[in-house]
Image: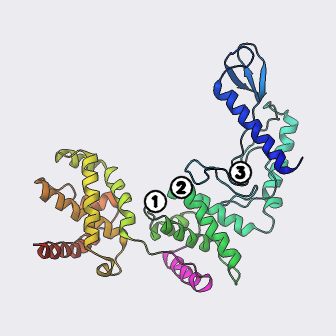
């Protein structure tokens, strides 16, 4: 039997098992079935219907309708993107410290100690080998991703860019931590509003993890990376920060209290404010913004949008410069400086429309 035939047979077994479990009936007495110690067992007559097989997380090849959102993730076995993997499979799951046999029963104490030692040896020097620098960089990436609350897609994209740059760079990489920070910057810029993380936040979180990474060093490394490999982070737009700014405002108790006191419902105010922010950002193209910080510019546009909404609906303003500063951690003078330019652009647009 070939490998293809073997995979096909196991696929048929998985389908038949799933059908029996989903039906929740015993083929002999029509009783309810339960899973116990690795077997699908009838709760009435006690017959073992079949073994319990766990479908693999990663699948080889391609299925029908692979482009649908529910399609499985495909990749090489033993080669996950965000960590340094070896060939073959793990002893137990990735972070298991308590082991069971194939039937789901606990191993005795002596064998528990043996497999724990073997798993520890395999998971360090034997698996990492000469990839210790890459291992530490990806480990730092996993820690940073959790602190920034990034989703797995951004993390895996960062790891992919890092491995691609390392493999294609004609020169030796001397600072893997700085390189992973640059790749993280590239990834969050690619995901736009789905990962509205600023450059300053990336530098701060790496410093909190004990690494000497600054905004200047990330920018310098990004420029060097562009000349060496052709990769460069995309320029962030203020529109990318709109969901984040709205989320920060709507999660502030003072802002929500003032919204309700003005006669708005939080959901209605949020929707109207989002439309008005995008309207103002369209009035001020990138050619007129100069080198202004896009996140601060979005906060200032939000403050201006609140004033326009209040004037249109005959209500008092919800946001003040101080309240917007407290909710978004942006300095008041920065909001005031950007608002002056936005106000002039809105007045010019209003005069031209009249």
The spot of residue 3 in percent (x, y) is 85, 50
Q: Is residue 118 above or below residue 181?
A: above
Task: Choose top left, top right, bottom left or bottom right for residue 44.
Answer: top right
> Which mark sits nearer the N-terminus, 3 or 2?
3
The spot of residue 354 in percent (x, y) is 9, 72
The boundaries of the magenta stretch are 213-233
Asked if the residues shown at circle 2 and circle 1 are in contact, with their CB atoms under 8 angstroms apart, the answer is yes
Q: Which mark is residue 347?
A: none
- Spatial separation of the CA atoms under disc 2 and disc 1: 9 Å
Q: Is residue 15 left or right of residue 2?
A: left
Task: Tell me which residue sits at (68%, 80%) in the image.
Answer: 169
Mark 1 neighbour density, 10 Å: few (under 14) some (14–19) many (20 or more): some
Badge 1 is on which residue?
A: 194
Q: Is residue 38 above or below residue 333?
A: above
> Which mark sits nearer the N-terminus, 2 or 1?
2
Q: Secondary structure at mark 2?
A: loop
Badge 2 is on which residue?
A: 151
The spot of residue 19 in percent (x, y) is 68, 30
Q: Secondary structure at mark 1?
A: helix
Q: Nearer the viewer, residue 348 or 105?
A: 348
Task: Choose top left, top right, bottom left or bottom right for residue 182.
Answer: bottom right
Task: Tell me which residue sits at (12%, 59%) in the image.
Answer: 311
Residue 218 on the magenta span: yes
Q: Nearer the viewer, residue 24 or 248?
A: 24
Q: Is residue 72 left or right of residue 238?
A: right
Task: Tell me which residue sits at (77%, 36%) in the image.
Answer: 13
| Residue sitting at the far right | 1
Badge 3 is on which residue?
A: 59
The spot of residue 340 in percent (x, y) is 20, 74
| Residue sitting at the far front | 64
């Amino acid at each position: 039997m070939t490998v293809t035939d073997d995979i096909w047979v196991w696929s048929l077994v998985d389908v038949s098992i799933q059908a029996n479990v989903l039906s929740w009936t015993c083929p002999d007495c029509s009783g309810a079935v339960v899973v116990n110690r690795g077997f699908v067992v009838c709760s009435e007559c006690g017959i073992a219907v079949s073994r319990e097989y766990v479908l693999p997380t990663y699948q080889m090849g391609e299925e029908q309708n692979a482009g649908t959102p529910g399609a499985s993730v495909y990749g090489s076995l033993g080669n996950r993107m965000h960590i340094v993997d070896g060939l073959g499979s793990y002893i137990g799951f990735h972070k298991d410290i308590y082991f069971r046999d194939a039937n789901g029963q606990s191993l005795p104490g002596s064998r528990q100690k043996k497999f724990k030692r073997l798993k520890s040896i395999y998971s360090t020097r034997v698996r990492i080998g000469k990839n210790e620098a890459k291992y530490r960089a990806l480990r730092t990436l996993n820690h940073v991703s959790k602190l920034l609350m990034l989703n797995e897609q951004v993390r895996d994209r960062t790891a992919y860019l890092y491995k691609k740059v390392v493999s294609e760079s004609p020169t030796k990489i001397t600072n893997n931590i700085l390189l992973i920070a640059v790749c993280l910057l590239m990834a969050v810029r690619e995901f736009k509003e789905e990962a509205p993380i600023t450059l300053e936040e990336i530098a701060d979180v790496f410093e909190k993890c004990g690494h000497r990474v600054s905004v200047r060093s990330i920018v310098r490394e990004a420029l060097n990376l562009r000349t060496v490999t052709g990769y460069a982070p995309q320029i962030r737009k203020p529109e990318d920060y709109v969901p984040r700014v709205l989320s920060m405002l709507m999660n502030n108790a003072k802002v929500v209290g003032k919204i309700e006191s003005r006669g708005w419902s939080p959901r209605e105010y949020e929707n109207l404010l989002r439309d008005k922010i995008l309207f103002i950002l369209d009035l001020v193209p990138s050619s007129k913004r100069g080198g202004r910080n896009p996140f601060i510019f979005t906060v200032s546009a939000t403050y201006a949008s609140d004033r326009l909404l209040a004037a249109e609906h005959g209500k008092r303003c919800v946001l003040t410069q101080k309240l917007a500063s407290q909710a978004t951690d942006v300095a008041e003078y920065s909001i005031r400086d950007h608002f002056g330019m936005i106000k002039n652009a809105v007045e010019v647009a209003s005069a031209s429309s009249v």
